[in-house]
Image: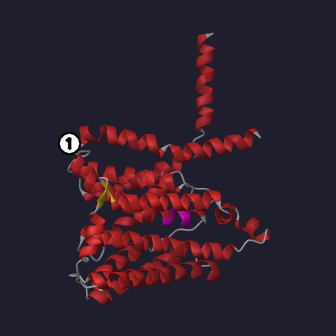
Amino acid sequence: MAGTNRRRWRTKSAYFAIWPATFALFAISPFIARGSISLGALRSTLPFAAILAIVSIGQTLVIQQRGLDLSIPGIVSISAILATKIPGGVDSKLIRAVVIVLVICAIAGLLNGLVVTMFGVTPLVATLGVNALLLGTILKITSGAQTASATPNLVHFAAGRVLGVSNIILLAILVIAVVTFIVKSTVIGRRFVAIGTSAPAARAAGMPVRLYQTMTYVIAALFGAIGGILLAGYLQTPGLSGGNEYLLPSIAAVVLGGTSLAGGGGSVLATAGGALFLTQLQQVVFGAGAPASVQLLIQSIAIALGMGLRRVPWKNLFSKFHSTQAVATT
């Protein structure tokens, strides 16, 4: 019982740690980059944090299944490109464009999942291959130049607010709530966690392991598609490589949120906290005048720290500290 409680404490503390870290980052931000937490700055950066959170939720689910999705850049980019190119600025064609984007990305996710589960290809190689396929498709359909702009309705939704809160942020909150409920409170969610924790044990218990693992890649691709569509609406004219900005950050957000790369349990809410932390960190770094290369370096360090700090036996250290203090006072 004591061992079980200790493991639960470590798990909860791993998911909670991102929030005081994020609070501390916001507290020191004005001293590093003046104006980085002004109302205007927050209104412009928080939607990007919400988009990253949505994309990272899909990455979280894949990592919980001991996988890794490196096709995120291609999925986000092709979603943004097609969401603007297919309708050609005409609102009446927007719904058709969204459906086409979702179908294409679902097929890409299905390809990821089948190659990994049916053919035994490592997720790293499989998803990189699909990513290359998607990027090649983008170059083919755009001829290397993107001139299409988002439709007025898409721009209006991406830039719109409800009671002062961005629609993109509200959508991210909804996604977080729905995914958290499914994972924590449904049979599907409990089986999902069990398969991620130990696929052989889940298979012995009669669970459809391959189906769950395959569909996880499909769901991750759909979240990437949603992120790409929102990005197109927010930027209005997205670039061909807009999805490149979401590969390393989506992994970093998951790690900073406390989800282990070894699979099993995870927290999409904590991943959202990691996305918020990284977005504000980028705001501070750029506001301080540092080059983009520094941002990549910091993201890499964040992943390393997130993985390393998770293994620190905080409870034992605190217990030893309190014991030492008690001995010193006697």
Q: Amino acid at mark 1?
A: Arg
Using the rendered view, name the quadrant where residue 193 is placed: bottom right
**Looking at the image, which is closer to me, 40 or 286?**
40
Q: How many marks?
A: 1
**Looking at the image, which is closer to me, 85 or 205?**
85
Using the rendered view, name the quadrant where residue 13 is placed: top right
Expressed as whole percent of the image width and height from the top left, the position of residue 17 reads: 50, 43
Magenta stretch: dominant secondary structure: helix
Expressed as whole percent of the image width and height from the top left, the position of residue 104 reads: 44, 84
Instruction: State the SS at label 1.
Output: loop
> In this picture, which residue range is highlighted in magenta?
58-63
Q: Residue at x 42, y 42 (%)?
A: 21
Q: Is residue 60 magenta?
A: yes
Q: Is residue 190 above or below residue 99?
A: above
Expressed as whole percent of the image width and height from the top left, the position of residue 312 reads: 57, 42
Q: Is residue 132 magenta?
A: no
Q: Which residue lies under the disc numbered 1?
A: 34
Q: Residue at x 48, y 55 (%)?
A: 271
Q: Residue at x 54, y 47 (%)?
A: 15
Q: Quadrant of the C terminus?
A: top right
User: In the displayed structure, does residue 243 sit left or right of residue 192?
Assistant: left
Expressed as whole percent of the image width and height from the top left, the position of residue 159 reads: 27, 64
Residue 83, can we see it? yes
Q: Residue at x 51, y 78 (%)?
A: 109
User: In the displayed structure, does residue 221 sit left or right of residue 294?
Assistant: right
Residue 238, can we see it? no
